[in-house]
């Protein structure tokens, strides 16, 4: 077991104009850990997630993944932003699953999954297709390889999106409210895949409204509000005995 955290956020801040969205977030996620982030809309949860893979640049503090600064290099005590190509190279190792599935509508499930490994990593079509087939089996869609997104339910599309992220063999998976765009009866099938992924030892950060999932799967639960971490700890403890008034007020509305 390495002593290096998989994710280390040190006083991370992010502004959009005069709006301070993140106000000095400090968090640590160990390899193999599942961290769930909950909180009201506009609390900065999704922005923090996007900063971890440099889809948003931070305005203060620093973020590291597996001991490497994200989006920047340090030289003589100063930080310099990486070129787009270098940042994209870093991003390959971080899988991200969005609220909207973002699948290419003109490509089949298998083609959606093989596109990045072939283009970005130069993997042969035969090898990428074999891996895609294996991943579709893993997410319970072994018979849907030739299906186009329009012929899949929302839950199935999200499972293809998870398989697509896994095809790049990431060391870290980020989930940004992956079930919030789904009909309630389809939520379970996506959460089941995520539970399996957690069991397999994947390091995961999940922004979610699914408190049952957080209670069952997370090692750490973080409650964010107005750009700060209000409370963090074991999920059962926070959900049953929150220490802060803001956490209590939020949970009284969602539990």
Image (cartoon, rainbow, N blue to C red):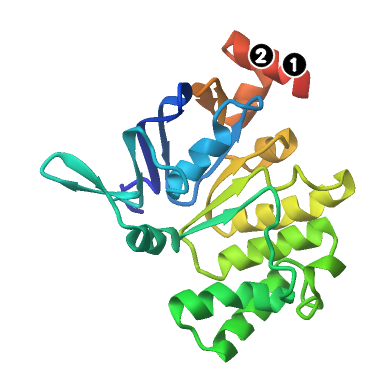
Image coordinates of residue 17 in percent, x first then y, are: 45, 27
Q: Farthest residue toward the front?
A: 17
- Alpha-carbon neighbours of circle 1 within 10 Å: few (<14), some, or many (≥20)? few
| Most foreground residue, 103 or 252 | 103
| Residue at image point 83% right, 67% down | 150
Please tell me how many numbered marks the rendered image carries: 2
Which quadrant of the structure image shows residue 167?
bottom right
| Residue at image point 48% right, 51% down | 32
The answer to the question of whether label 1 and label 2 lie on touching residues, with beta carbons closer than 8 A, is yes
Tag 1, which secondary structure?
Answer: helix
Q: In the figure, is residue 226 to the left or right of 248?
A: left
Quarter containing the N terminus: bottom left
Labelled disc at residue 204: none
- Alpha-carbon neighbours of circle 2 within 10 Å: few (<14), some, or many (≥20)? some
Q: In the figure, is residue 55 to the left or right of 62?
A: right
- From the image, tell me which residue sits under label 1: 252
Rendered view: 198 above or below 229: below
Q: In the figure, is residue 189 to the left or right of 200?
A: right
- Work out whether residue 125 can be spotted: yes
Image coordinates of residue 76 in percent, x first then y, are: 10, 43
Rendered view: 125 above or below 102: below
| Residue at image point 14% right, 39% down | 77
Image coordinates of residue 4 in percent, x first then y, are: 31, 48
Quarter containing the C terminus: top right
- Work out whether residue 255 can be spotted: no
Image coordinates of residue 127 in percent, x first then y, are: 55, 87
- From the image, tell me which residue sits under label 2: 248
Label 1 and label 2: CA atoms lie apart by 6 Å
């Amino acid at each position: 077991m390495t002593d290096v955290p998989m994710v280390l956020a040190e006083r991370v801040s992010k502004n959009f104009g005069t709006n301070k969205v993140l106000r000095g977030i400090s968090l640590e996620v160990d390899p193999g850990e599942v961290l769930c982030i909950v909180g009201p809309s506009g609390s900065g949860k999704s922005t923090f997630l996007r900063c971890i893979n440099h889809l948003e640049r931070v305005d203060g503090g620093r973020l590291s993944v597996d001991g490497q600064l994200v989006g920047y290099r340090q030289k003589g005590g100063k930080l310099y932003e990486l070129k787009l190509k270098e940042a994209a190279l870093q991003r390959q190792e971080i899988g991200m699953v969005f609220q909207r599935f973002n699948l290419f509508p003109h490509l089949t499930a298998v083609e959606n999954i093989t596109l990045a490994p072939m283009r970005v990593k130069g993997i042969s079509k035969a090898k990428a297709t074999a891996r895609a087939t294996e991943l579709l089996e893993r997410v319970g869609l072994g018979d849907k390889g030739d299906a186009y997104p329009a012929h899949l339910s929302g839950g199935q599309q999200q499972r293809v999106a998870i398989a697509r992220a896994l095809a790049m063999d990431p060391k870290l998976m980020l989930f940004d409210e992956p079930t919030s765009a789904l009909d309630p009866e389809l939520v379970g099938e996506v959460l089941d895949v995520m539970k399996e992924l957690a069991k397999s030892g994947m390091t995961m950060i999940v922004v979610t409204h699914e408190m049952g999932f957080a209670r069952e799967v997370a090692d750490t639960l973080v409650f964010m509000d107005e750009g700060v971490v209000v409370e963090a700890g074991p999920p059962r403890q926070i959900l049953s005995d929150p220490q802060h008034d803001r956490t209590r007020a939020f949970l009284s509305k969602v539990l």
